[in-house]
Image (cartoon, grey):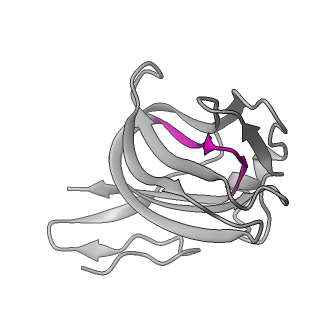
Amino acid sequence: MAIVGFGAITPVTVVGGSFTPVSLSGVAFTAGNWNGDTPGNLGAIADGNTATATTWGRTYGGGNKGWIQADFGQTLNRVYLEVLIGLRMNAGWDGGEANWTVEASSNTQFFLPLWQAIRIKPTSNERVLLLNLWGGFRYLRVSTEDVGAGQTELRWYDLRAWQMNL
């Protein structure tokens, strides 16, 4: 089964259904729980340009989990996502460890992990990841947490979503 590549805007026909792009024009983006730098320029996530991104969000200290959240305004089912994010440690904290997570929820009280990078030791060089995910949710949250003497950073470049029609 072939999935639409990044930047495509037309549905793809697959056995038993097709994919229709989800409009991001009404999606509300927020950021929370950052004790360092709070990411700005959240509109870059849905601007359709993979070269633009939010500003860096930074958090430090065990147990603090900074996040950027997308609220689709309604629960979406059978959704295929492409999430493009950047990860790094703040310069001078290359020995630190961090968790990065993409989570989904229907109510913002309980989040289910769709993807996790646990206790990795990044450097101050940015690592850009394109994540391909499936789910059913209203809220999508990308987060980072310092878990070992570091200052972990995150920025979100782009989000694309397609809903499967059966």
Query: Residue visible at 64% across and 30% down?
Result: 64
| Residue 99 is one of the magenta-drawn residues | no
Q: Residue furthest left?
A: 16
* Residue 123 relative to residue 160: left or right: right
Q: Quadrant of the C terminus?
A: bottom left
Q: Is residue 101 visible?
A: yes
Foreground pick, 111 / 135: 111
The correct choice, above or below, for 9 with respect to 59 in the image is: below
Foreground pick, 73 / 10: 73
- Horizontal and vertical percent position of residue 12: 35, 74
Q: Is residue 76 visible?
A: no
Query: Residue visible at 66% across and 45% down?
Result: 25
Query: Residue visible at 77% across and 72% down?
Result: 51
Q: Quadrant of the N terminus?
A: bottom left
- Horizontal and vertical percent position of residue 129: 57, 69
Residue 28 appears in which quarter of the rendering?
A: top right
Secondary structure character of the magenta stretch overall: strand
Q: Where are the magenta residues, as a range? A: 139-156
Foreground pick, 76 / 63: 63
The correct choice, above or below, for 118 with respect to 104 in the image is: below
* Residue 54 relative to residue 136: left or right: right
How many numbered markers are drawn? Answer: 0
Query: Residue visible at 43% across and 75% down?
Result: 4
- Horizontal and vertical percent position of residue 9: 53, 70
